[in-house]
């Protein structure tokens, strides 16, 4: 960090503007002495990163993807993360009267769980790095017409453990080139086999929620930021003497295209990640900025936070703390990419009669004392010109203002 500050300072003393000075620090990291030590340390420990890899790296300025839910525009990053999955789920859930079902009723839990499973199945097969072919069918995946067809697959009486990815290509005027792979796709692998021990269950759920932090910020000038930085978890491999912890995200790649032809490991490619910051606008103005940490649970908890505000009228703090539920039916982004069809995490406050109804629908129930996830959020009260901050009581999150 001192070297980066020094590179910026030297550039400024040479008369360069601040933008060029920041790029001088950037170049020292990716092409200079920091890069050399980074690569030396990585290769010393058996890693494959080269100086050319670092020099070729670039940050892409991207257009977000979005959907409109009841007049609110919700924005996410594109397919190299899981963000569009929440937009898909919202499109599916628009076809149901969620408010009439009641907050966290068994019918509501079941409907949202099924919608998430449909969206996550698509994530598991179609999401990947958009800078490598084939091109992800995002237009079809985010089509309202496609969502209506997916919504018809929901059995309102029972969980479907065999939900598969759909075919979004016709909804963008194309033919799916991966139909043979799609027909073979099996959501029950690779977790089938011997009965699961308590230890293996705990290990699976621990990896399911791995990593990440979140930051939401806004100022009086109208700037709004939603960030979920992540990657170098502890314990981490440190690149030589740089102090830089290396990312473990490569485990999110697949090796077999039959699992996901868009996310097969390849030189220079980014693995599909779970990071998923969120911005929402109403009438063209900021409405919500929200994010959460927690691996594959992120867009599940953010979806429910959003519905808590929009459908059930909760204020931002209530919505961050409200009891959520999580599905484990999607393929885990970490470890062995396992799946647990029908398993659901419920809050301990869910009453006995709802538990009985959910078991009758085919669910395997687990429980937690706090299930909102560590959500951070800002609500913009445009009527009064104020911000409302919310941080859940799930982790070590907090809000500050001045």
Image (cartoon, helix red, strand yellow):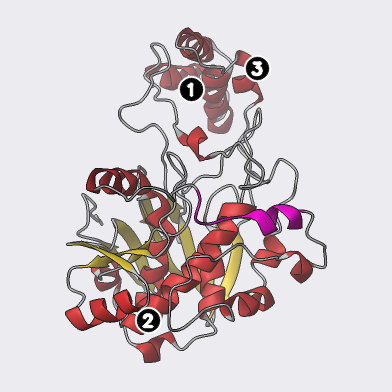
Earlier along the polypeptide chain: callout 3 or callout 1?
Answer: 1
* Chain-order first, disc 2 or disc 1: 1
Nearer to me, 284 or 234: 234
Judge whether residue 187 is colored magenta. Answer: yes
User: 10 Å neighbourhood of mark 1: few (<14), some, or many (≥20)?
Assistant: many
Residue at x 30%, y 83% (from the top left corner): 105
Mark 2 neighbour class, 10 Å CA radius: few under 14, some 14 to 19, many 20 or more: some
Q: Secondary structure at mark 2?
A: helix
Quadrant showing the C terminus = bottom left
Local secondary structure at mark 1: helix
Asked whether residue 169 appears in the rendered view, the answer is yes
Q: Do the CB atoms of the residues marked 3 and 1 lie less than 8 Å apart?
A: no
Q: Write the start and end of the magenta stretch as one range.
A: 178-189
Residue ID for mark 3: 52
Residue drawn at 41 percent across, 12 percent down:
240
Q: Is 245 on the left or on the right of 11, as rendered?
A: left
Q: Earlier in the sequence, mark 2 or mark 3?
A: 3
**To which residue does mark 1 refer?**
8
Residue 277 vs 152, above or below: the answer is above
Residue 39 sits inside the magenta stretch:
no
Q: Residue 108's mark?
A: 2
């Amino acid at each position: 960090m001192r070297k980066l500050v020094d590179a910026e300072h030297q550039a400024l003393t040479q008369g360069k503007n601040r933008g060029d000075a920041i790029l001088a620090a950037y170049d020292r990291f990716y092409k200079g002495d920091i890069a050399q030590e980074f690569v030396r340390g990585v290769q010393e420990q058996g890693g494959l990163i080269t100086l050319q890899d670092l020099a070729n790296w670039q940050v892409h300025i991207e257009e977000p993807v979005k959907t409109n839910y009841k007049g609110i525009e919700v924005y996410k990053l594109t397919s190299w993360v899981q963000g569009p999955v929440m937009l898909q789920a919202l499109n599916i859930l628009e076809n149901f009267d969620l408010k009439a079902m009641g907050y966290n009723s068994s019918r509501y839990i079941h409907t949202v769980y099924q919608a998430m499973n449909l969206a996550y199945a698509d994530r598991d097969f179609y999401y990947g790095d958009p800078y490598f072919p084939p091109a992800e069918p995002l237009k079809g995946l985010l089509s309202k017409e496609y969502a209506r067809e997916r919504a018809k697959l929901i059995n309102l009486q029972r969980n479907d453990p065999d939900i598969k990815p759909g075919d979004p290509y016709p909804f963008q005027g194309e033919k799916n080139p991966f139909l043979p792979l799609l027909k073979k796709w099996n959501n029950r692998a690779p977790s089938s086999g011997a009965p699961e021990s308590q230890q293996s269950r705990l290990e699976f759920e621990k990896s399911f929620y791995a990593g990440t932090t979140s930051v939401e910020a806004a100022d009086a000038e109208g700037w709004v930021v939603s960030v979920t930085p992540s990657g170098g978890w502890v314990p981490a491999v440190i690149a030589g003497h740089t102090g830089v912890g290396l990312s473990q995200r490569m485990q999110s790649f697949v090796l077999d295209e039959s699992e996901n032809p868009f996310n097969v490991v390849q030189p220079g490619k980014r693995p599909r990640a779970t990071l998923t910051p969120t911005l929402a606008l109403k009438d063209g103005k900021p409405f919500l900025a929200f994010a959460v940490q927690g691996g594959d649970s992120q867009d599940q908890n953010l979806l429910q936070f959003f519905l808590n505000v929009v459908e059930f009228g909760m204020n931002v703090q209530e919505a961050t703390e409200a009891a959520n539920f999580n599905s484990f039916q999607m393929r885990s982004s970490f470890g062995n990419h396992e799946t647990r069809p029908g398993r659901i995490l419920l809050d301990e406050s869910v009453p006995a009669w709802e538990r009985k109804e959910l078991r009758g629908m085919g669910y395997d129930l687990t429980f937690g004392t706090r299930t909102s996830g560590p959500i951070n959020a800002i609500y913009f009260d445009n009527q009064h010109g104020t911000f409302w901050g919310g941080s859940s009581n799930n982790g070590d999150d907090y809000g500050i203002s001045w």
